[in-house]
């Protein structure tokens, strides 16, 4: 359990360092401002965060998604997928049934617990736009929630890249959101943000234009 927690912490540290590195390397270099309070970091991205739906492909949206939402797996410092929202997983002998178990203590930012049916709806929504998600679903006969903690992939054929697909930090991120949002039609991008990750998106505090600090 200590090792998994360390991995989750390293992943979140990696997100922070990636954003800072991108900020300093870009020709349109955003501003990082240290507040009078040492506990406050102001980050101004290279472009306005006009779209907050994880299905939007903008890089600024991807950075937002990685901070506000969580994923089932995440990449470690060696680029290998590790459990993130999961306590563990098993694969049957013919590699056609993957059983994923959510860890305890997962909550959305509105106070609701993260349940397996939220995960199923989120992954189905993600797969409608993402190439790797589409490939995974093409190899899947059934994706279901066995109970509140258990997600089951029943595959048509082996798909050994399943953890990597669910860990990828590039557009589009397989972000986990509440079922009632994930089940909405995908022809219109979501404007409501109920995250599952380490940072909370506070709509009332959003500044919609880019301006110098």
Image (cartoon, rainbow, N blue to C red):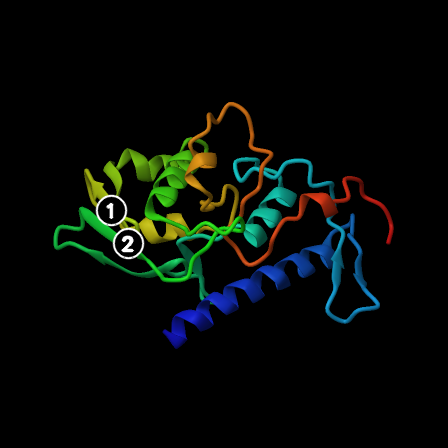
Q: Residue at x 29, y 33 (%)?
A: 138
Is 185 drawn above or below residue 151 in the view shown? above
* Left or right of 156 on screen, residue 16: right
* Left or right of 131 on screen, residue 11: right
User: Viewer-proximal residue, 198 or 13?
Assistant: 198
Residue situated furthest top in the rendering: 187
Q: Quick one: label 2 or label 1, which is nearer the N terminus?
A: 2
Disc 2 to disc 1: CB gap under 8 Å: yes
Asked whether residue 54 appears in the rendered view, the answer is yes
Find disc 1 in the rendering and name its residue.
152
Q: Position of residue 59 (x, y in %)?
A: 62, 43
Q: Residue at x 22, y 58 (%)?
A: 90
User: Viewer-proximal residue, 14 or 204?
Assistant: 204
Image quadrant occupied by the C terminus? bottom right
Is 127 drawn above or below residue 151 in the view shown? above
Find disc 2 in the rendering and name its residue.
100
Q: Position of residue 116 (x, y in %)?
A: 33, 47
Residue situated furthest left in the rendering: 93
Query: Distance between the Cα atoms at labels 2 and 1?
Result: 6 Å
Q: Residue at x 23, y 50 (%)?
A: 98
Q: Position of residue 45 (x, y in %)?
A: 73, 49
Label 2 crowd (10 A; few <14 / some 14-19 / many >=20): many
Q: Residue at x 48, y 27 (%)?
A: 186
Is 164 drawn above or below residue 143 in the view shown? below
């Amino acid at each position: 359990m200590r090792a998994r927690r360390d991995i989750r912490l390293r992943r979140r540290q990696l997100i922070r360092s990636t954003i800072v590195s991108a900020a300093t390397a870009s020709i349109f270099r955003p501003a990082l401002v240290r507040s009078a309070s040492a506990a406050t970091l102001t980050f101004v991205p290279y472009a306005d965060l006009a779209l907050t739906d994880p299905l939007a492909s903008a890089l600024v949206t991807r950075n937002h998604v990685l901070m506000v939402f969580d994923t089932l797996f995440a990449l470690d410092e060696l680029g290998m997928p590790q459990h993130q929202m999961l306590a563990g997983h098993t694969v049957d002998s013919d590699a056609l049934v993957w059983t994923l178990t959510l860890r305890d203590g997962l909550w959305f930012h509105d106070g609701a617990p993260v349940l397996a049916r939220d995960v199923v709806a989120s992954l189905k929504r993600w797969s409608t736009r993402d190439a790797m998600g589409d490939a995974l679903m093409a190899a899947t006969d059934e994706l279901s929630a066995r109970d509140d903690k258990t997600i089951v992939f029943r595959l048509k054929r082996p798909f050994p890249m399943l953890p990597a697909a669910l860990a990828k930090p590039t557009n589009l991120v397989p972000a986990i959101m509440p079922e009632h949002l994930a089940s909405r039609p995908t022809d219109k991008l979501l404007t409501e943000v109920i995250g599952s990750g380490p940072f909370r998106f506070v709509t009332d505090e959003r500044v919609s234009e880019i301006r110098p600090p």
